[in-house]
């Protein structure tokens, strides 16, 4: 939207396409505004007065006003906060049902694509490499193949590689955001060993993890010309740590400062992406830790409330961000004292961790101990 382009310009599409009387045009514009969650009071405001979510609703209204049969949605929600993304996706699905519109939905986030789409095409290096059905697909026969999508493919060295199956207890919400309508919780899922894992095996303790110098060695990162990290190596033992925690039923979330695509690349290349239920990035929220919004976004995406804070630990290497942010929110803080790139001590009481570990695998033992305490407390309260 241009800075001098307000919502009243939506009527331009009606003038150009239908040559309707002014009174009918105004009725159509008001009706579309209402359908997309906008009010008449918005009609004369300019873009600087709107949030990202409202601007996206205006863009949808502009597209709908011409009564199209097809709308191309190119990264329609990628710039929005995680708390707004689900609202826009649900709005698009409602409008599609009401107006019988076809969408071509383009996104790098396969979980969004899978949720909103009837049919899905996966492209790599400009070519379609796989096609199949999304969650909404209803075809039968050979064409009804379900795409493995993010649980089956990853990019490494410019080639498509097989990725390990999504592990037990992993109920990653779409795009690290709020649940979408139509996204069902899985009652039981196949673990990596092929055995059925039930929900009651999920641990009480919930683990938030930073990425750089907590899982990935920042000293090994390689960036492209845009500053996006395209590859990097794990800290010794960090990959095993993540797998062990996930296989034992711990719910895991990434809460990290940086570019979303950087972390997706790093976790995918190292085969760790699908172990995380939720992924929260500062790029999405436009804030960095220790902002409480980072931690609350992860809690919201995992459907956790204030009463669940005693069940959460935040593991990171940065005292001023990870530890301070967790302490401020009443979340247990764990400092991974692994790198010399960041201070190892602080005189500020707000930056003193509840626990200190010297290597990633030490987190497994600590998690087991803390989970046992939570389980015992729960039994006593019961």
Image (spheres, helix red, strand yellow):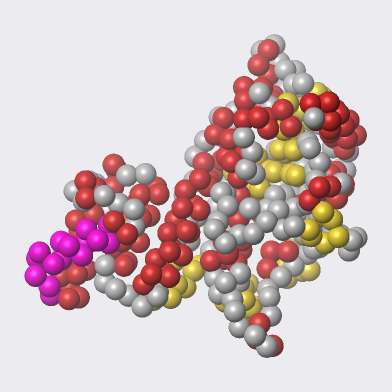
Residue 135 visible to an observer of this rendering: yes
Residue at 27 percent of width and 62 percent of height: 32
In which quadrant is the N terminus drawn? bottom left
Magenta-colored stretch includes residue 25: yes
The main secondary structure of the magenta stretch is helix
Magenta-colored stretch includes residue 381: no
Q: Position of residue 338 (x, y in %)?
A: 81, 31
Indicate whether 330 appears above or below 10. above
Residue at 83 percent of width and 26 percent of height: 380
In which quadrant is the C terminus drawn? top right
Q: Quadrant of residue 291?
A: top right
Residue at 20 percent of width and 75 percent of height: 17
Q: Position of residue 85 (x, y in %)?
A: 49, 52
Indicate whether 97 appears above or below 222. below
Q: Position of residue 144 (x, y in %)?
A: 66, 82
Left or right: 205, with 142 as reference point: right
The furthest residue to the bottom? 141
Q: Write the start and end of the magenta stretch as one range.
A: 19-33
Tally of numbered tags: 0
């Amino acid at each position: 939207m241009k800075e001098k382009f307000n919502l009243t310009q939506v009527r331009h599409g009606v003038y150009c396409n239908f040559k309707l009387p002014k009174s009918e045009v105004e009725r159509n514009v008001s009706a579309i505004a209402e359908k997309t969650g906008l009010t008449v009071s918005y009609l004369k405001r300019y873009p600087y007065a709107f949030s990202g979510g409202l601007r996206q609703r205006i863009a949808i209204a502009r597209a709908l006003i011409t009564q199209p049969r097809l709308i191309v949605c190119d990264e329609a929600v990628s710039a929005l906060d995680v708390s707004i993304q689900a609202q826009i996706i649900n709005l698009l699905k409602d409008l599609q049902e009401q107006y019988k519109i076809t969408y071509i939905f383009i996104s790098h986030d396969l979980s969004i694509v899978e949720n909103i789409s009837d049919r899905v095409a996966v492209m790599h290096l400009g070519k379609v490499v796989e096609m199949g059905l999304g969650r909404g697909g209803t075809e039968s026969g050979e064409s009804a193949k379900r795409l493995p999508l993010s649980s089956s493919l990853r990019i490494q060295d410019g080639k498509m590689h097989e990725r390990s199956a999504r592990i037990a207890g992993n109920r990653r919400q779409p795009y690290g955001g709020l649940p979408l309508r139509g996204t069902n919780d899985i009652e039981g899922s196949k673990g990596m060993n092929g055995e059925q894992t039930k929900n009651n095996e999920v641990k009480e303790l919930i683990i938030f993890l930073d990425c750089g110098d907590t899982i990935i060695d920042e000293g090994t990162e390689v960036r492209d010309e845009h500053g996006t990290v395209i590859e990097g190596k794990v800290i010794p033992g960090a990959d095993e740590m993540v797998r062990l925690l996930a296989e034992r039923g711990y719910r895991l979330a990434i809460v990290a400062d940086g570019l979303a695509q950087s972390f997706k690349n790093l976790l995918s290349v190292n085969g760790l992406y699908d172990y995380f239920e939720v992924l929260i990035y500062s790029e999405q929220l436009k804030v960095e830790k220790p902002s409480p919004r980072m931690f609350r976004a992860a809690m919201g995406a995992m459907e956790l409330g204030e009463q669940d804070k005693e069940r959460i630990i935040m593991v990171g290497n940065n005292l001023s961000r990870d530890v301070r942010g967790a302490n401020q929110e009443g979340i247990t803080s764990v400092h991974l004292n692994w790198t010399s790139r960041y201070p190892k001590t602080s005189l500020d009481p707000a930056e003193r961790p509840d626990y200190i570990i010297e290597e990633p695998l030490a987190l497994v033992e600590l998690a087991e101990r803390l989970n046992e305490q939570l389980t015992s407390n729960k039994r006593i309260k019961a």
